[in-house]
Image (cartoon, rainbow, N blue to C red):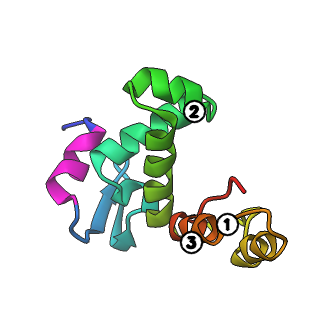
Amino acid sequence: MNKDWSYVTKITENKPITVIKVKTDDNITIEGYFELPPIAKLSSDDQVFVAVFVKSHGSIKEMEKYFGVSYPTIKHRLNQIGSKLDFVEVETTVTKDRILEKLEQGKITVADAIELLKKGDSDV
């Protein structure tokens, strides 16, 4: 039996998959239709990225060292992966209203507001 977790992900990447039969190590078999958990639906690369993020305790500095890329690249990748995991809603501190409020107060420019709204950035 192939115990390489990435094997299934690689052969099914970007395709829907339904598990029909599950067998445990002690020969218990369960049959039915089971959907994979959202994290298992990520590409192999994204799963590795999430694993490194968790192992580094969410340290973007550690992620930069591990992957050899910049802070904005890590943030962008995290945002991309986060958008694929819509089963969890995380309320950010910045909303469209807050961005517009800062614009009205003159704390940011129109160009800044447009960019923040495009990026969905929470660093306002």
Q: Residue furthest right?
A: 105
Front residue (pair 23, 110): 110
Main SS class of the magenta portion in the image: helix
Magenta residue check for 12:
yes
Q: SS class of the residue under badge 1?
A: loop
Q: Which residue is mark 3?
A: 114
**Amino acid bearing label 2:** Ile
Q: Which residue is mark 2?
A: 60
Task: Indicate whether 5 appears above or below 42.
Answer: above
Q: Which residue is mark 1?
A: 109
Q: Measuring 72% from the left and 71% from the top, which residue is drawn there?
A: 99
Q: SS class of the residue under badge 3?
A: helix
Q: Measuring 76% from the left and 79% from the top, which residue is drawn there?
A: 97
Mark 1 and mark 2 residues within 8 Å of each other at the beta carbon: no
Q: Measuring 38% from the left and 24% from the top, which residue is drawn there?
A: 68
Q: SS class of the residue under badge 2?
A: helix
Q: Quadrant of residue 60?
A: top right
Residue 5 position, x and y percent, is 30, 40
Quadrant for the C terminus, please: bottom right
**Amino acid bearing label 1:** Thr
Mark 3 and mark 1 residues within 8 Å of each other at the beta carbon: no
If you read the primary sequence from the N terminus, does the residue marked by circle 1 or circle 2 appear first?
2
Q: Which residues are magenta?
A: 5-13
Instruction: Rate crowding at label 2 as few (under 14), some (14 to 19) or many (20 or more) other CA atoms within 10 Å.
Output: some
Q: Is residue 103 visible?
A: yes
Residue 35 position, x and y percent, is 38, 70
Q: Residue furthest top?
A: 65
Instruction: Rate crowding at label 1 as few (under 14), some (14 to 19) or many (20 or more) other CA atoms within 10 Å.
Output: few
Residue 47 position, x and y percent, is 38, 44
What is the CA distance from the residue labelled 3 to the residue labelled 1? Answer: 9 Å
